[in-house]
Amino acid sequence: MGIVDRAEEAGFITTTLDKLLRWGRSRSMWPVNAGIACCSLEMMTTGAGRYDFDRFGIMFRSSPRQADVLIVPGPITKKMQPIVQRVYNQMAEPRWVIAMGSCAISGGAFADSYNVLPGCDTFLPVDVYIPGCPPRPEALIYGCLKLKEQIANTSFIGSAARNKALYVPPDLGEEWPDELLRQFGVLPADDSSEGGSRDVGEVRDEG
Amino acid sequence: MVNFPRSEATGGTETLLLNVGPQHPSTHGVLHFMLEMAGETVVTAKPVIGYLHRGIEKLAENRTWQQVIVLTDRQDYVAQFSNEWAYCRAVERLAGIELPERAEWLRTLMGELNRITSHLIWYAGVTMDIGTLGTPFIYAWETRERIFDFFEAVTGARMMPNWMRIGGVRTDIDPALLADLRTFLERDFPKECDTYEALLTGNEIVVSRMKGVGVYTAEECVHLGITGPFLRASGLARDLRRDAPYGAYAKLDFEVCTDPVGDSLARCRVRLRELRESARMCIQLIDGMPEGDIAVKVPKALKPPAGDCYVRTESPRGELGVFVASDGTTRPYRYRVRSPIFYGLSAMPRLLPGHLLADMLVIFGGIDTSMGEIDR
Amino acid sequence: MSAALWLRTIVGLVALLALLAGVTLFGVWWERKFIGHLQRRRGPLHHGWHGLLQLPADMIKMIAKEDTVPTAADSLLFQFGPVAAIVPAYAALAALTFAPGIALIDMQHGLLYVFAWETMLPLAFALIGWSCANKFTLIGGLRAAAQLISYEIPMLLAALGVVLTAQSMNLTTIINAQTGWWYVFKQPLGFVIFSVAMLAEMNRSPFDLPEAESELVAGYMTEYSGMKFGFVQLAEYSVLLVGSYLIAALFLGGWNMPFLPASWLWLALKIVLLMTSTMWFRGTFPRLRVDTLTQMSWKWLLPAALVNIMLVAALALWLGPKVY
């Protein structure tokens, strides 16, 4: 919602809207129905009868456009990485990422493989890590409730929300052109003297 | 604009390249189908695999013989016990280890239960593919949960048990648990099976959509090396549990389920009957469970003599072959898996053309793929 | 127009909008709850009393979601698509009479008016499917067009039977003609044809081919995010409401109830029951294939509808309008 995201100062209207947004967004998290490996089975288990994600308003959507949360359930291979990245890019803002299981966190049992990335946080801004191989459905629910807490406690007013959208992965940040970073306000507009002083790591300010 | 190729099959009109997957609700993991479509009809189908290639076979060369079991669990995450079992049998044969009888029976019990859970996942998948909103899916999942409770009580883990050991199994099963399981399999499970049959093969819409769709003859299956329920649904009664018995199968009374038709519906019928057969076998296993040790002593630094061996087992998806080679050290020299459904998938380019998009997904869902096993 | 008429129109429009929004919110909640219980689970539970606040939360989220427009999409048509879907859906509500005398406009040819707007929807869905530059939406949009057009014909023919008997296209007259026997007993064949065709018209399972989740991801809505997706859903629920209303009004006696005084409550009850039964179908049935779908319409429903009309006309001539 533009008013809230663009507002630099918190006024009465923006804070009220912000409260409403936090309430709505935290209570309606729709994950993408993107199964990758073993953990996707536990993800489905959580959606099925005994654990029932729908109780918390968590409903799987197959189209990334309509989803809010990307649960990464499995090891990311080098061939899969562009696909996951694309699914993430297709999702509409605001969006969150849950790294489910050791493979998505660090590569897990396949950490020393030649084809598995050491975790999905190498290219995605992960909000919640759920350890386990695979995590139990209870753990996944706990992780989702933690994310709900995080959303409910994060103000969407002003720069925090924008910076979240502008997350630059640490290792990719080097490759981003300066003009682009300046345009988005990551680098100060007048600072054209040197490009090496930017501190990409601090972009992700979630308050 | 992209110029689409013109196809002879459609009378010279343009065809459409449709990418189904890797992120698509019906690809059961991360399979990618490149479909050349004429309207809704598939002209050519090309499965693209490798999105889940984790290099398990190479990783195994850097693990000790026992540590590989961790990887075999994750290799096919739908049939964990079958994969553990295949690997352990290969190593045991290589090292010349004889198992106590109880260990064999326990392994067979878990293997059959695992066949049930695996078929239930197939059932959940195929009913989703055919367009239900998830009601049969959730019913199947609930039964799977009951069996997973048992797995958890025995092995301590729901999905990745890491329970079989070279030379036996890790933990014994409590008699009370076995009794509980027996009650469940005898009293509740057949009722659940009735529900599954009513919702799948008993539903008129399903029958009209599956009958005569995706017919594959036994001869074609043999040419491609297809095994398991896929082959048995084409009329050839080939089952390693009966033809080359291992574990406790030689002492069990069971029927090899076949169907002469070879279409999608036949594959459903065979798997649904196998559910009941497996439950029947589990009951026999529980009743006849011998007393004794659950494992033999095997040195921690196991060094099988140099050599190699190839062992076949009947996994829920077909003939799962494991080849291990040893150079006399504590690590495998080579570990290679013959994944059954990889061969099933290779039938897709021949099986799918001419079918509608909706049928294509049903045929594909009906063969029960697991991408973890194909890509490894 | 006089000031009173203006006021009445505006109040009526707002009331209809509120009705549509209320039915959608309550309907989605009820659907998730009902199907949840069909599937041996609870459905929305923790946000509000038994999850009643779930839908407001979803709506707030959707309104505040980023509005993505794919680069390759036809931007103008893409933006226009949800409007094209929501306008006919909303406009069709204007002619519905909910109780004797309670309607925005009690049109002389209300039935025709409703059908006219409903037939605009496949156009909107095809438009949406085309504009997204996505192959899944394209297939979904074309499926929607093919399906809705082939089922409109038997639906209209089945409704014609009722019009013949009631000798009016006014919804109030049609409902009042059913104070005795409902038309479902007089024209059972027409009822079956109309219900099946209406189910297809609502895109409900087993006719949910345009948005077939397992085949087409989300069908023609695949590329829509945020409130555009919400609008398309709103349009779908409006069709569900109008469809259930029409079945109740044309065949199930509208606000009439045997042995009890006529009241809008009966109509509401019938609509709720009909909507619930479509949800029941949705939770139970698999999907038809696209060729069986069109074949069923052209080879079975259409001839049956023609037979129905001839039968109704012959009976009406033979027995006279007073009896039949």
Image (spheres, coloured by chain):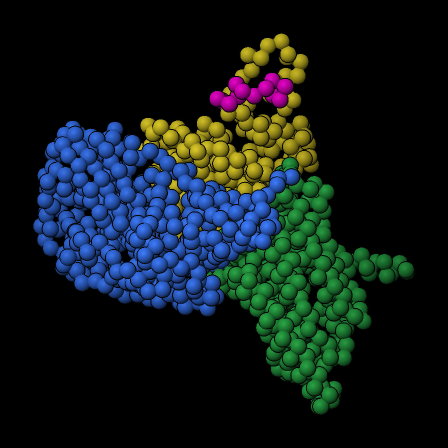
Chain colours: A yellow, B blue, C green
Q: For the point 56% across and 29% down, which residue is it?
A: A164
Q: In front here: B10 or B291?
A: B10
Q: Residue furthest top?
A: A193
Left-right relation of B260 to A46: left
Is A118 drawn above or below residue C208 in the view shown? above
Residue C282 appears in view? no
Residue C114 image position (x, y, % from top left): 73, 65
Q: Is residue B292 magenta?
A: no
Pick whichever, A158 or B283, lies toward us. B283
Bounds of the magenta span?
Answer: A170-182
- Using the image as rendered, state which of residue C287 and residue C40 is in the foreground: C287
Give x and y (percent) for residue C82. Answer: 68, 49
The vertical placement of C186 against A16, above or below, is below
Q: Residue most toward the right?
A: C2
Quadrant housing the N terminus of chain B: top right
Position of B121 with respect to C124 (left or right) is left
Main SS class of the magenta portion in the image? helix
Query: What's the residue at 41%, 33% (across, down)?
Result: A77
Residue A152, given in percent of the width and then of the height, sits at 54, 38
Quadrant containing the C terminus of chain B in the rendered view: top left
Where on the picture, by quarter, is residue B245?
Answer: bottom left
